[in-house]
Image (cartoon, rainbow, N blue to C red):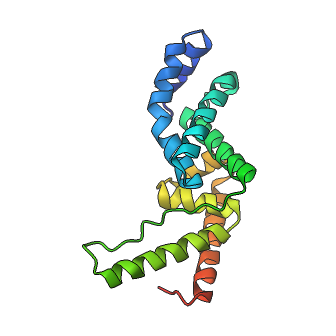
């Protein structure tokens, strides 16, 4: 289901109504910032990338295709900008795994969860960017296969294949470190 309100805002903005673009920015600034933060692991870098994303989106607004969702279009810009930023700075950043004890852990449990989290982060970082992206979109942002396909501009079948391969590679990396289910 397409968000027709977003398409109307884009049309209004292209007609000269800058307030319409402000509405789009307010609507999507948090998810765009969160994506950049998850990829870059630095709040200042994430804020810079988010700002760049909206500047580029505004500049390229006339290339937006209403057959697609605005969110997918701007999210794809955010992915590309985050990747480009990462390449430019050549940082190896962590991904949060969210692996923590459910209740107040003992010090030993907390240390074990932290070690496992660090191992998961290291394993994810060893994947190629294509595999990292499907893992992040699926497991950190809860995207459906269809949403992932649209954001990544690849067929859904390719998304499923990449996700399967990424999970297998993660298992291999973790298994080599002695970490199993």
User: How many numbered discs sit on the rendered protein?
Assistant: 0
| Residue nearest the observer in this picture, 65 or 108 | 108
Relative horizontal placement of residue 86, taking residue 171 as reference (left or right)? right
| Residue nearest the observer in this picture, 119 or 132 | 119
- For the view shown, which residue lies furthest in the right direction? 88
Kindly identify the residue that appears in the image at 67 percent across and 68 percent down.
Answer: 127
- For the view shown, which residue lies furthest in the bottom direction? 178
- For the view shown, which residue lies furthest in the left direction? 104
Tell me where residue 147 appears, x and y as whole percent: 55, 48
Kindly identify the residue that appears in the image at 68 percent across and 45 percent down.
Answer: 80
Image quadrant where residue 101 sits: bottom left
Give the vertical position of 40 relative to 4 (above or below). Answer: below
Tell me where residue 59 appears, x and y as whole percent: 68, 23
Q: Is residue 18 visible?
A: yes
Give the vertical position of 121 relative to 181 (above or below). Answer: above
Give the vertical position of 130 relative to 60 (above or below). Answer: below
Relative horizontal placement of residue 141, taking residue 14 as reference (left or right)? left
Tell me where residue 104 appears, x and y as whole percent: 25, 73
| Residue nearest the observer in this picture, 30 or 148 | 30
Kindly identify the residue that appears in the image at 39 percent across and 80 percent down.
Answer: 111
Kindly identify the residue that appears in the image at 70 percent across and 26 percent down.
Answer: 63
Image quadrant where residue 41 sits: bottom right
């Amino acid at each position: 289901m397409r968000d027709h309100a977003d398409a109307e805002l884009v049309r209004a903005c292209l007609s000269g109504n800058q307030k319409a673009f402000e509405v789009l920015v307010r609507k999507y600034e948090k998810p765009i910032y969160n994506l950049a933060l998850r990829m870059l692991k630095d709040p200042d870098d994430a804020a810079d990338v988010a700002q760049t994303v909206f500047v580029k989106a505004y500049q390229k607004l006339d290339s937006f295709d209403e057959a697609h969702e605005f969110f997918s279009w701007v999210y794809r810009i955010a992915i590309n900008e985050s990747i480009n930023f990462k390449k430019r700075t050549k940082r190896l950043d962590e991904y949060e795994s969210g692996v923590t004890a459910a209740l107040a852990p003992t010090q030993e449990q907390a240390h074990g969860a932290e070690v496992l989290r660090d191992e998961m982060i290291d394993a994810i970082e060893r994947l190629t960017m294509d595999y990292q992206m499907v893992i992040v979109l699926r497991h950190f942002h809860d995207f459906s296969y269809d949403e992932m396909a649209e954001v990544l501009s690849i067929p859904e079948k390719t998304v499923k294949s990449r996700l399967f391969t990424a999970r297998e590679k993660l298992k291999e990396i973790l298994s080599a470190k002695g970490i199993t289910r």
